[in-house]
Image: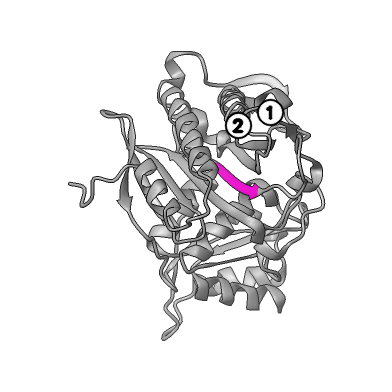
């Protein structure tokens, strides 16, 4: 039984009331994101029945094979976002360039003041195996004065985020978001079609005994990182060892588990991919904002993720994210 019968939109509006000067645009934008993700959730749950499994035959900007659900999620989000009236630009991991919102969609709100980044379907390589996947999003205020958004609007530090979140499509559909006042989780009740509050003000434990990393790349890691993972698996007395390995290979799923129970997720750079494979704007920034609001930490091994100045839309970064003490310990090894 739910302790509180609170819908996502009611929660957003209650947060908005804390800011007397709020225009309501951000609240409406978050509601639009939730609606688009409800539609995606429905299609994810019946993908095998309506021929949305498998590949389209195309490659995306990263040279990866595009899944049919990838394309569907991207199209659904873009269409829902561009007509919302709250955005001047959209940036998607599946699109090479950012998408300026057309003037006709900004007519009612000539000062549409937000831009959005999103990974339409994180973990899409796991789609056909029925493993949890998700949508990650990040919202910024525009820096340009008016009209359609610009590249400058899209290339902002993570510290400038005004909202971030993710929706995970698994045994249930879960939405987690923050606007800078804590992290809150909601579960989609399919009987009423509403996201209902299940976890208010989530706090990640300061330390845990769980680590998540693809150990198949062990030989490509730096010596410091190999030493850290070896230490985690050791049976050293008095050092809270050994840790348990938990790795799904779907960032949203691995991150969500660690957010609730504690732990560290790592996707480092290695000898093959110097900057790893995760995208700063679409994955690292929003999850870093969330984990810091929950009391955790996120770095690239040397620098706070939210302090990194992006140079291009698809910039990649190593990522160490999760419980604060675990991430600090990992940094010491990586820097050594």
Q: Residue at x 55, y 51 (%)?
A: 163
Question: Residue 158: where, in percent of width, then height?
Answer: 66, 58
**Residue on which the image places disc 2:** 85
Q: Residues within 10 Å of mark 2 (few under 14, many from 20)?
A: many
Q: Per the image, is 138 magenta?
A: yes
Q: Which circle marks residue 65 in the picture?
A: 1
Dominant secondary structure (helix, strand or loop) of the stretch shown in magenta:
strand
| Relative to 162, residue 50 above or below | above
Q: Residues within 10 Å of mark 1 (few under 14, many from 20)?
A: some
| Relative to 325, residue 310 above or below | above
Question: Is 7 positioned to the left or the right of 162 in the image?
Answer: left
Q: Per the image, is 285 magenta?
A: no
Question: Is 222 positioned to the left or the right of 26 in the image?
Answer: right
Q: Considering only order in the chain, which callout, 1 or 2, is on the residue closer to the N terminus? A: 1
Q: Estimate the spatial distance between the alpha carbons at disc 2 and disc 1, rounded to whole Å.
A: 32 Å
Question: Residue 254: where, in percent of width, then height?
Answer: 48, 51
Q: Residue at x 56, y 59 (%)?
A: 289
Dot in front, 2 or 1: 2
Q: SS class of the residue under badge 2?
A: loop
Give the camera-side residue of 205 and 129. 205
Please provide the residue range marked out in magenta. 136-140
Q: Quadrant of residue 122?
A: top right
Q: Which circle marks residue 92 in the picture?
A: none
Q: How many marks?
A: 2
Q: Quadrant of residue 98?
A: top right
Q: Quadrant of residue 221?
A: bottom right
């Amino acid at each position: 039984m739910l302790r509180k019968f609170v819908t996502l939109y009611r929660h957003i509006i209650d947060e908005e009331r804390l800011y007397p000067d709020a225009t309501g645009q951000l609240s409406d934008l978050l509601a639009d994101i939730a609606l688009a993700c409800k539609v995606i959730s429905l299609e994810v749950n019946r993908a095998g029945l309506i021929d949305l499994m498998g590949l389209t035959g195309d490659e995306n900007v990263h040279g990866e094979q595009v899944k049919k659900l990838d394309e569907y999620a991207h199209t659904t989000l873009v269409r829902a976002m561009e007509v919302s009236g709250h955005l001047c630009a959209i940036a998607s991991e599946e699109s090479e360039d950012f998408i300026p919102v057309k003037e006709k969609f900004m007519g009612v709100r000539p000062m549409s003041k937000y831009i959005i980044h999103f990974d339409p379907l994180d973990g899409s390589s796991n789609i056909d195996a029925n493993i949890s996947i998700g949508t990650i999003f990040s919202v910024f205020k525009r820096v340009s004065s008016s009209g359609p958004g610009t590249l400058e609007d899209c290339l902002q530090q993570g510290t400038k985020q005004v909202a971030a979140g993710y929706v995970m499509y698994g045994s249930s559909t879960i939405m987690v978001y923050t606007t800078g006042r804590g992290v809150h989780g909601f579960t989609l009740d399919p009987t009423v079609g509403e996201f209902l509050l299940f976890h208010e003000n989530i706090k990640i434990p300061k330390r845990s005994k769980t680590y998540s990393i693809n150990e198949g790349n062990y030989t490509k890691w730096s010596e410091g990182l190999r030493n850290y993972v070896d230490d985690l698996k050791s049976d050293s007395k008095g050092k809270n060892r050994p840790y348990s390995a938990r790795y799904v290979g779907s960032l949203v799923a691995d991150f969500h588990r660690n957010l609730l129970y504690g732990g560290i997720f790592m996707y480092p750079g290695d000898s093959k991919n110097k900057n790893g494979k995760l995208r700063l704007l679409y994955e690292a920034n929003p999850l870093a904002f969330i984990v810091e609001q929950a009391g955790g930490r996120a770095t690239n091994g040397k620098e706070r993720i939210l302090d990194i100045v992006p140079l291009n839309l698809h910039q990649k970064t190593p990522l160490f994210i999760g419980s604060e003490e675990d991430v600090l310990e990992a940094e010491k090894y990586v820097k050594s």
